């Protein structure tokens, strides 16, 4: 007997509506890549595996912030979690950015609510993290929050130019 395997496109099972009710219902779905410019810097916003927003900003490769020593001076939600000459492989841009350096952050830290992660693991994750029944409050970081974090990051970089 010849069986036919059917593959579901990733976007078919990663819709925000699958995560229950929340602010994410008014935002782009899982695989959206939002690109915008601010003060001549290319900015990228996308979601990670947990459904949380990640933001990336392009800086010149010769910027002093392309070194980890200087990056510690930058203030962004959860700290910088990406510093590389390239973007994550899941992000493809149409224009050339080969003379660039990228700084990034994510909204998947302790205290951040990750809707897809919660939908997938639910109370299991809470029980694993808090076996004594303690609890904590998580807040969902919206697209607008992530965009404002990138803008504030650029403001810091621009205000400290040599």
Image (cartoon, rainbow, N blue to C red):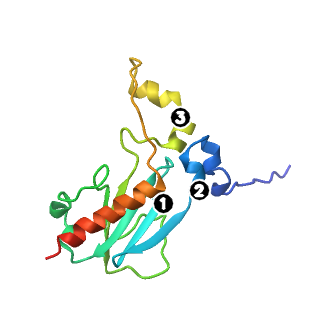
- Label 3 secondary element: helix
Along the viewing direction, whichever of 31 and 75 lies nearer the viewer: 75
Eyeballing the image, is 122 above or below 92? above
Q: How many numbered markers are drawn?
A: 3
144 to 100, vertically: above or below: above
Question: What number is the disc on residue 134?
Answer: none
Residue 140: image location, x then y, percent:
46, 44
Q: Quadrant of residue 154?
A: bottom left
Q: Which residue is mark 1?
A: 46
From mark 2 to mark 1, how far is it between C-alphas? 9 Å
Task: Give the structural element (helix, strand or loop) at label 1.
Answer: strand
Is the residue marked by circle 3 packed among few (<14), some (14-19), or many (20+) residues within 10 Å? few
- SS at circle 2: loop
Q: Is residue 7 found left or right of 78 in the rendered image?
A: right
Q: Which residue is mark 2?
A: 29
Residue 77 place in picture, x, y as percent: 32, 51
Circle 1 crowding by C-alpha within 10 Å: few under 14, some 14–19, many from 20: many
Q: Which residue is labeled 3 in the image?
A: 121
Label 2 and label 3: CA atoms lie apart by: 19 Å
Residue at (13%, 77%) from the top-left corner?
A: 162
Position of residue 147 measured from the top left corner of the image (x, y, whole percent): 41, 61
Q: Is residue 66 visible?
A: no
Q: Residue furthest top?
A: 132
Question: Mark 2 or 3 closer to N-term?
Answer: 2
Tell which circle, 2 or 1, labels the residue nearer the N-terminal end: 2
Tell me: 126 left or right of 18.
left
Residue at 43% in and 67% down = 44
Quick one: 143 or 65, which is closer to the camera?
Answer: 143
* Front disc: 2 or 3: 2
Q: Residue at x 30, y 62 (%)?
A: 152
């Amino acid at each position: 007997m010849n069986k036919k395997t059917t593959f579901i496109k990733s976007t078919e099972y990663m819709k925000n509506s699958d995560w229950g009710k929340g602010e994410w219902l008014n935002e782009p779905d899982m695989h959206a890549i939002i690109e915008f410019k601010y003060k001549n810097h290319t900015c990228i916003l996308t979601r990670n595996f947990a459904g949380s927003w990640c933001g990336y900003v392009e800086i010149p490769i010769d910027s002093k912030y392309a070194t980890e020593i200087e990056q510690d001076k930058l203030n962004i939600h959860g700290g910088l979690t990406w510093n590389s000459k390239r973007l994550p492989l899941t992000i493809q841009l149409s224009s050339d950015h080969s003379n660039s350096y990228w700084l990034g952050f994510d909204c998947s830290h302790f205290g951040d609510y990750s809707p897809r992660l919660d939908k997938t693991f639910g109370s299991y994750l809470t029980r694993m993290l808090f076996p004594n029944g303690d609890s904590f409050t998580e807040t969902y970081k919206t697209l607008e929050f992530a965009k404002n974090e990138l803008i504030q990051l650029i403001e810091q970089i621009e205000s400290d130019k040599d």
